């Protein structure tokens, strides 16, 4: 899948999940919950959702509420985004998709002896 297409899909999923959690799900355990980032696997079978609470702590009750609403959210994603394959949702409070993931990727490349992505190959 094209990288830009995957990015658009990921952002659309994040927006819909944010809307569902903050506006439509009426579970008090989900109050103050925010979708930080979504990472979709290239085959679009799994979506890893990083969440955080405004209070800073996401407890087991909150994760339980999300697990209970998982099928509803998946069905809503399928209807709203008209997706052929709707990914399985995996919620995580410790997910780190941002800068740390990039650092980890760079360190792996260094260990393997690969050049950076933006370096041109010699002619």
Image (cartoon, rainbow, N blue to C red):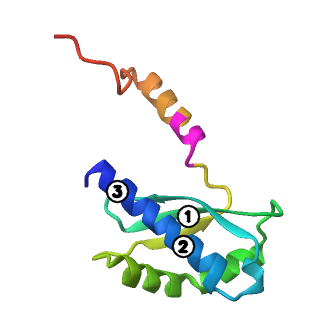
Q: In the orientation shown, which residue stands out farthest toward the left? A: 123
Which quadrant holds the N terminus?
bottom left
Task: Tell whether label 1 touches label 3 (CB within 8 Å).
Answer: no
| The image quarter in which residue 83 lies | bottom left
Q: Residues within 10 Å of mark 1 (few under 14, many from 20)?
A: many
Q: In this rendering, would 10 be left or right of 15?
A: left
Q: Is residue 53 magenta?
A: no
Magenta residues, start to end: 97-102
Position of residue 92 measured from the top left corner of the image (x, y, whole percent)? 62, 63
Q: Residue at x 67, y 66 (%)?
A: 34
Q: Earlier in the sequence, mark 2 or mark 1?
A: 2
Q: CA distance from mark 3 to mark 2?
A: 16 Å
Label 2 sits on a secondary structure element that is helix
Residue hosting label 2: 17
* Predominant SS of the magenta segment: helix
Residue named by callout 1: 49
Callout in the foreground (3, 1)? 3
Residue 85's disc is none
- Give percent across and percent down for residue 35: 61, 64
The residue located at (31%, 62%) in the rendering is 43
Neighbour class for label 2 at 10 Å: few (<14), some, many (≥20)? many
User: Would you name the residue on which mark 3 appears?
Assistant: 6
Task: Name the residue rendered at 51%, 37% in the picture.
Answer: 102
């Amino acid at each position: 899948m094209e990288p830009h297409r995957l990015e658009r899909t990921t952002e659309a999923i994040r927006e819909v999940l944010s809307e569902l959690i903050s506006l439509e799900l009426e579970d008090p355990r989900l109050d103050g919950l925010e979708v930080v980032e979504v990472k979709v696997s290239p085959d679009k079978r799994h979506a890893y959702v990083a969440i955080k609470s405004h209070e800073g702590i996401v407890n087991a009750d909150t994760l339980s509420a999300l697990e209970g609403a998982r099928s509803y959210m998946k069905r809503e994603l399928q209807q709203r985004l008209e997706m052929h394959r709707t990914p399985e949702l995996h919620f995580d409070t410790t997910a780190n998709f941002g800068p740390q993931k990039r650092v980890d990727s760079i360190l792996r490349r260094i260990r393997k002896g690969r050049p950076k992505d933006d370096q041109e190959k010699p002619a």
